[in-house]
Amino acid sequence: MTETAGTYGTEFFVRWLEAVAEAVEREADRLTELDAAIGDADHGANLRRGFTAVRKALEEEPPTAPGAVLVAAGKQLISTVGGASGPLYGTLLRRAGKALGDDPQVTRERFAGALGEGVEAVSRLGGAAPGDKTMLDALGPGVEGLKVSFSAGRDRAGEGAAGTVPLRARKGRASYLGERSAGHEDPGAASSALLFAALAATARAEAADGTRTDGEGAA
Amino acid sequence: MKMLINVPETVVADALRGMAAAHPELTVDVERRVVVRRDAPVAGKVALVSGGGSGHEPLHAGFVGPGMLDAACPGEVFTSPVPDQMVRAAAAVDSGAGVLFVVKNYTGDVLNFEMAAELAEDEGVRIARVLVDDDVAVTDSLYTAGRRGTGATLFVEKIAGAATEEGAPLERVEAVARRVNERSRSFGVALGACTTPAKGSPTFDLPPGELELGVGIHGEPGRERRAMMTAREIADVAVEAVLDDLRPTGPVLALVNGMGGTPLLELYGFHAEVARVLGERGVPVARALVGNYVTSLDMAGCSVTLCEADEELLRLWDAPVRTAALRWGL
């Protein structure tokens, strides 16, 4: 595996999605508990089913570019998750993947830009805006942080998710609760934060392996 | 919570295998989760396709058959189906006259049916869509996902299904379906939470002496919690809530719908109270249906749906139907 310093290849993105699948597996019960409070108690199970399918697809037909990894993962999520999170997470990854095109190596900044396009597509599809107590409240800050470093992406996304606690939901099933939706963390924002946490962990592991020379992953 | 299941992971597939065994008049694709009436596509007929999360049985698969749906796409429990299912269903039932998707207004259902419509149209199937949003407990505003689709789904599927059997073209079926939705309103009450197979414990905590007003059909808590009320008091609140929004000027179709965990004995007693309130308010009941049709797993409670009828809607309501859960006139 040869990589130019400061760029990330197909393998990195596959490892990231595997890390997301592991995180979803580990956190499935917590996500379901959050969803039980203001939704219908299935967010963990649905994402677990989706990312298990993503892993299988990436193993069976390994894509050859970072963009293709994300597009393949997005398609799997749309075809297996259902609910709102299937189309929304699927669109996030597909759009980001398309923005990366066929490039074999991409920089963190480039990936942050592509993910930003994915977040815009999610916002359009779901009709939600920041502050509506949705996944966007973690995704938006996460992308902003990612422009600075992987760890900043993780931190900002985590803060964004935690910041949904006092909010009143305006979109999705939690919106039916009105004021009663306040006081709970949004499950979609919580799972979105997992994406960025897994990304930072993947980058750190890569740095520890010595495959990285720019110190980026250690941030 | 004890459940009559093997393992939570296979509840939907197991139920579909059961449907296949019980109803040879249906073609059930257990693997791909599509239930189709055996004689589809019916030449020259517009097809009606619906779907949604499982856990609301008999909705939707129980309404597949002559006079109602041509196909249904069940998702995981309380989770909308994926686009692939609706694309497959549309291809299986389209006679060339087009397909109407009946979609309950939930973010997940709307998004997945939207994606499916685009894909099916790419394959040359003409698709129209109607959204069902009848639940008055949710204010339709910028601050919510809009009113939920609940009991009116049965009215829309039955009446639009009858219109397709009469040979109405796609635009006409769509217009009838939309009219039924616009004239329908619902209000739901929970006496207890439901238990999803995956979670295994109640989705919310409702103490014995209390009830939830304004609940949906996914085990989500309602808008307001009150001390337990009698059937008479609940009917007053539920019917008033519907009439405040609907204000019918003529006779109505009335659905007293059980949420899955309330016996018919109680539902009929409750319907007596609903009929009383409607009588007091001067609203004639043209037709009534009482039973568990749009359920929320094992939730105790009920909903009231009223649809302001006219001659055409009544004629289509009375038209023959032959499905697993609803059949008359055939």
Image (cartoon, rainbow, N blue to C red):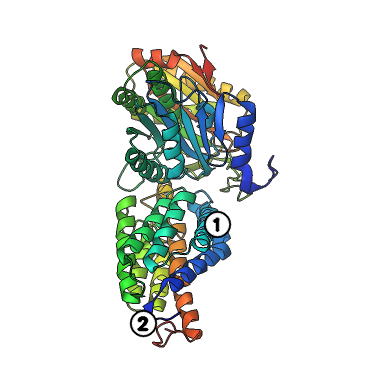
Name the element at disc 2.
loop
Quadrant where the C terminus of chain A sits is bottom left
Question: Which quarter of the picture shows residue A117?
Answer: bottom left
- Horizontal side of A44 relative to A172 (left or right) equals right
Label 1 chain ID: A
- Horizontal side of B49 relative to B33 (left or right) equals left
Image point (41%, 67%), residue name: A64
Sooner in the amino-acid sequence: mark 2 or mark 1:
2
Q: Position of residue A207 (x, y in %)?
A: 46, 84
Mark 2 in CB contact with mark 1 (< 8 angstroms): no
Name the element at disc 1.
helix
Q: Is residue B26 above or below residue A111?
A: above
* Cα separation between marks 2 and 1: 38 Å
Q: Is residue B74 above or below residue A184?
A: above
Which residue type does callout 1 highlight? Glu
Q: Is residue A81 visible?
A: no
Question: Which quarter of the picture shows residue B267?
Answer: top right
Q: Position of residue B89 (x, y in %)?
A: 45, 35
Which residue type does callout 2 highlight? Gly
User: What label sits on residue A33 in the rendered view?
Assistant: 1
Please tell me how crowded label 2 is: few (under 14), some (14-19), or many (20+) other residues with Cα within 10 Å.
Answer: some
Q: Is residue A132 above or below residue A199?
A: above
- What residue does disc 2 label? A6
Same chain? Circles 2 and 1: yes
